Image (cartoon, grey):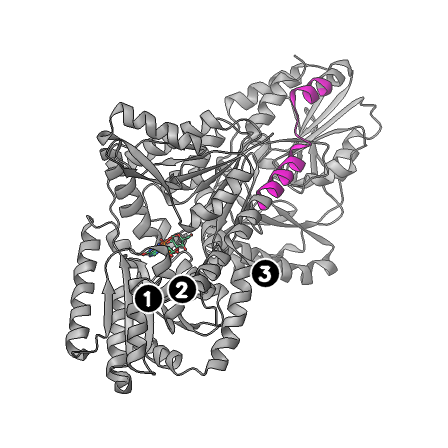
Amino acid sequence: MSKLHIVANRLPFSLVKEEKGYSLIESVGGLATGMKSVYTEYDGKWIGWSGVNSDTLSDEDAKSIDRQLLEKSCVTVPLSEKEILEYYEGFSNKTIWPLFHYFTQYVDYSPENWETYKRVNQRFADKVLEVAEDGDTVWVHDYQLLLVPEMIKSVKPNVTVGFFLHIPFPSYEVFRILPWRMELLKGMLGADLLGFHIYDYERHFLSSVRRLYGYEISFNEIHSEERIIKADSFPMGIDYNKFKKTSAAVMQKTIQERSDLHKELEKYFMTSPDRRLILSIDRLDYTKGIPQRLRAFRKFMQKYPEFHGKVTLIMLAVPSRGQVEEYMMLKREVDELVGNINGTYGSINYTPVWYFYRSMPFENLVELYNMSDVALVTPLRDGMNLVAKEYVASRNNQTGVIILSEMAGVSKEMGEAITINPINEDEIADAMHKALTMPLEEQKERMKYLQERIERYSVFKWAGEFVHALENVKRLQKEFLVKKISNGVFKDINRKYTKAQKRAIFLDYDGTLTAFHKNPQEATPNEELYSILNKLIADERNTVTIISGRDRETLEKWFAEVPINLICEHGVWLRKYGEDWQTLTNVNNNWMPMIRPVLERFVDNTPGSFIEEKNYSLVWHYRKAEPEQSVIRANELKDELLDLVGNLNLEIMEGSKVIEVKSGGINKGIAANKFINNENFDYLMAMGDDWTDEYMFKELPNSAITVKVGIQRTSANYKLESVDAVRKFLSELGN
Ligand code: GDG
């Protein structure tokens, strides 16, 4: 049975040092909770790091840890001190983390860290390859492991790989800064499905793929050389019921049973009926906007003095990456701001900011959620932000207001929150006022919708939807593989080929015999291609024809020495070898002066694009233009041309990064049929890569062997994945 394995930087257990050896405690984080349901259900393993520096472990301890973890279906990837420093604290947290959160000024470009990142990613991949068998599924998580999908896929292509990024994917303008951007994208593209929290990250990712790799992207499907890869958004949820139930349970405790924190909070409320709490919870990280939040609170105190003595900000900042310079600076700034606000607005019996620089047990966290009137969630950038969702889930009486940064992924799902720009301190201060004075009825109305949504799309639903989408991608990929020429199919084609006495072979040029070049004039045939063609032609039973959209001068020049037939400009011209050029149709080009100015306008407003003039057609090429803009321009051009061409009996053809206008009444299908007319060929074959070749595939007799190069939908009977595969196929024919 196929299994599903999880790969993440950390395992869902932490190690606790005991007097003798180590013991395990279960991690309660969001990812661990969500994934546990998945990998246990699918009988898989969880591959990750235990969180302990392997240099400090004796062999005996290491073995005992591995054994204990394996009992929990976990496989450890040990990390030494140097690796923790360079892969985890270094490249992951000092390079990718700041860059992907748009803190470009903090990015460290150390090549040593990059080398270690690659090496450690390979170690994770190697562990996966030991565990995963053909047919299994692997779900890789987050920015520490961006290279792992490709490292798995290149060795075991029959393992299905999913990848989820928990942080933002930045816009191309930021991503491109990274010297290793190509490698990172290649690593990610090893996955079959890539998940992001929200559509914005997905579209940034697709835009980088299009610009850096030039792959065709249709909606959210990427057409790489060998398969379809999907990107989609899956907003991560929480274990809603756990928060709801714990929140109800802590509030039902008797006075004696209550935690110290709970008692303190009750005391605070008891001193005056109009006392209020605003809550702020995060890791102490520069992406979370903590100093801005404190300054906004100070502004609130200045602007709304009627709240002095009545409102307290509880700020829980969990220590994080404390050895890193930027984090130390942040800590100092936060300490000073808290001191400043408390010094200015505090009194003997009133502290405006209660600041905790530590983490708290889960129950305390829920008490804070339950007892705070307002949640202040104002990150400068945040992939999702689960704190906002946890606050919603813990509000049993449906009151409470969330002030939410528009820069957090979660804001897309929380239209009922008060949204703010996290840099705009005035706006945040006013939002606090609005939240604290919001009528209870309105609070409940907003909270009701929030709760319904967050409860429905829980972390379990999120994980389930991702796995389901991954299965769908697998199905989609299979559909595309159905027509692929396997060894068995090749033998069959070759058997017919060998038996035949008179064969007609039609070969498209660009994208079929030769790869595309940014400059079409550089796509000249090489020695390998000449020798493949010469071998085909040497068999006198073969009539070989290159059938292309190119102009006749170019093809004639390139194939002057080859005894081959040429059909050019999509079927307008035919040159049988040894004969003169003849036209296959009655065409003219007196329409060109009307169409050319339209194309010229598009050249002017689309830098990098240019016009090619053939004898009977005009072509607008946009392969060298900015990819996203040119797709829009191509659609605009088609619209404009459609209005013009009807009256002129012209046709618009869309090829690979070209739009061609040509006289109507001819295409490659008509031309190929004219060519074979009245000659009794007993073997017909046509190969091509773009939709102008589909005319051949459709219009040649049913008995023809038609081969599409690429993975897109086609009416051809067969598919080959690349130019290399075509060359191999042709050179093996007849063997
Ligand atoms: C990354 C992305 C994305 C916090 N303090 C305590 C405590 N927590 C728990 C919260 C919450 C979690 O930590 C924080 O989650 P966030 O989502 O807010 O942020 P990151 O850690 O930065 O996580 C983020 C997330 O991945 C998931 O994809 O949302 O955007 O940056 O669950 O409850 N838990 C306990 N004590 C604390 O003191 N027990």
The magenta segment: 469-493
Mark drawn on residue 636: 3
Spatial CA span between label 3 and label 2? 67 Å
Q: Is residue 113 left or right of residue 460?
A: left
**Residue 320's x, y, as percent?**
26, 52
Q: Considering only order in the chain, which callout, 2 or 1, is on the residue closer to the N terminus?
A: 2
Nearer to the camera, 440 or 183? 440
- For ligand 1, tell me if the residue under mark 2 lies within 8 Å: no
Q: Residues within 10 Å of mark 1 (few under 14, many from 20)?
A: some
Nearer to the camera, 432 or 265? 265
Do the residues bearing badges 1 and 2 touch, measured as CB atoms within 8 Å? yes
Identify the image quadrant of the N terminus: top right
Q: Is residue 629 left or right of residue 313?
A: right
**Residue 181's x, y, as percent?**
37, 43
**Residue 371's x, y, as percent?**
37, 70
What is the magenta segment's predominant secondary structure? helix
Spatial CA span between label 1 and label 2? 10 Å
Based on the picture, tell me whether residue 471 belongs to the magenta stretch: yes
- For ligand 1, tell me if the residue under mark 1 lies within 8 Å: no
Mark drawn on residue 262: 1
Name the residue rendered at 72%, 35% in the picture.
716
Do the residues bearing badges 3 and 2 touch, measured as CB atoms within 8 Å? no
Do the residues bearing badges 3 and 1 touch, measured as CB atoms within 8 Å? no
**Image height check: is 585 above or below 640?**
above
**Residue 483's x, y, as percent?**
69, 31
Q: Residues within 10 Å of mark 3 (few under 14, many from 20)?
A: few
Nearer to the camera, 76 or 166? 76
